[in-house]
Amino acid sequence: MARLSLKKIVKRFKETEVLHGIDLEIGDRELMIFVGPSGCGKSTLLRLIAGLDPISDGTLSINDKVMNNVPPSKRGAAMVFQSYALYPHMNVYENMAFGARLMGLSKDEVKRRIAEASRMLRLEEYLDRKPRQLSGGQRQRVAIARAVVRKPDVFLLDEPLSNLDAALRADVRLEIARLHREIGGTMIYVTHDQVEAMTLADRIVVMNNGYIEQVGSPRELFETPANTFVATFIGSPKMTLLNVANENGKLAIAGTGAIDAPERFEQGALTIGARPDNFELEAGHGEDGFAGKVIYTEYLGDDSYVYVRLRSGEQVTVRVPQSIFFDADADVTVTAKLDTLHVFDRASGLRVS
């Protein structure tokens, strides 16, 4: 299908630079997802790939052909928008056929492609309906089917599920995963939803303030975050970070307590991180561990999350079995599974180990 290469991509709006030299390689048939907070530049980057906005500097290539000055219709890409962008006066069949007809395809070929896309996305019974007669999930499937009919080299999806409720998001997410397996196309997908990113992506690009923080598989980003930004952005609930001093074999927080320090840790000021699964909680204030008080316990059925405010003021999230419940303001001691701790440089935020 398509390989994409982005070299030193810069985007400026007047005097404001919003993308700062993006370098990225996207493989053939890969499902790549851009994630990051609002305003980080992920949708802007997608629009540059689509050709909807011009590149200020750098080079974009698709299959080794430079695309900087190639119009959107000639890039072999199809975009699915957050807002569906369906024509309200056309029925589903006409919406799906519109782009294919502009490509100069024969009537029979358009009909064949629509039948195929309708089958893949289970839209056969809705072809005569107008968009206003469809649910949000059905409209989004029509928007995706319209892209499929064009048989593009690259599918570009800009937060396609953000307008759907939780149940519909899960359903359409499965449709997208199945569609990618069936057609094998290269897909680039923008979202702010971690669940979408972690469950769909071959690789994830984590962006922040117009820079790429890390590129990797969902497992790589979760297990070995490159810095404190990725550590706290990937994972829900997020990783807890604690500023400690490593002295005399102990990781200490002043006025709060200490835990044993693994031998691999450097001496001095460090930032340690742990996921909720990797903390442990005991009632009362013990000799070893960090002392704090329970803020509240969040019951989720199979298990619960206990949110603790340490004496130092830092907040810790601990996952516990659903049978365990701590009252608000209860005194507790937090310890950690030492072999699971992440270590980051205090000054730069970069991963140490």
Image (cartoon, rainbow, N blue to C red):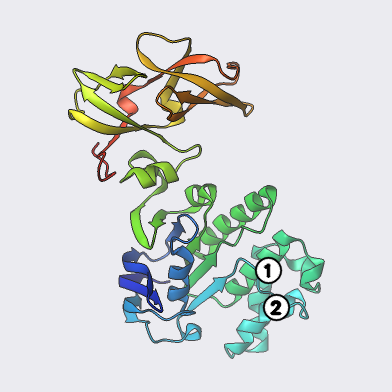
The image position of residue 193, as x and y in percent, is 54, 51
Residue matched to label 1: 142
Measuring 49% from the left and 76% from the top, which residue is drawn there? 77
Measuring 33% from the left and 65% from the top, which residue is drawn there? 25
Under circle 1, the secondary element is helix
Q: Amino acid at mark 2?
A: Asn
Quadrant of residue 96 within the rendered picture: bottom right
Q: Amino acid at mark 1?
A: Val
Q: Mark 1 and mark 2: span between their CA atoms?
A: 8 Å
Front residue of 195 and 210 = 210
Quadrant of residue 24 within the rendered picture: bottom left
Front residue of 353 and 38 = 38
Figure quadrant of the C terminus: top left
The image position of residue 206, as x and y in percent, is 40, 54
> Above or below — where is 348 with respect to 290?
below
Figure quadrant of the N terminus: bottom left
The image position of residue 249, as x and y in percent, is 21, 18
> Above or below — where is 130 with respect to 121?
below
Q: Is the residue under label 2 in contact with that under label 1 (CB below 8 Å)? A: yes
Under circle 2, the secondary element is helix
Visible in this render: residue 341? yes
Residue 2: mark? none
Residue 95: mark? 2
Q: In this rendering, would 253 be left or right of 240?
A: left
Front residue of 200 and 110 = 200
Measuring 54% from the left and 66% from the top, which residue is drawn there? 157
Q: In this rendering, would 15 be left or right of 303?
A: left
Visible in this render: residue 105? no
Measuring 80% from the left and 69% from the top, which residue is drawn there? 132
> Above or below — where is 112 with respect to 347?
below
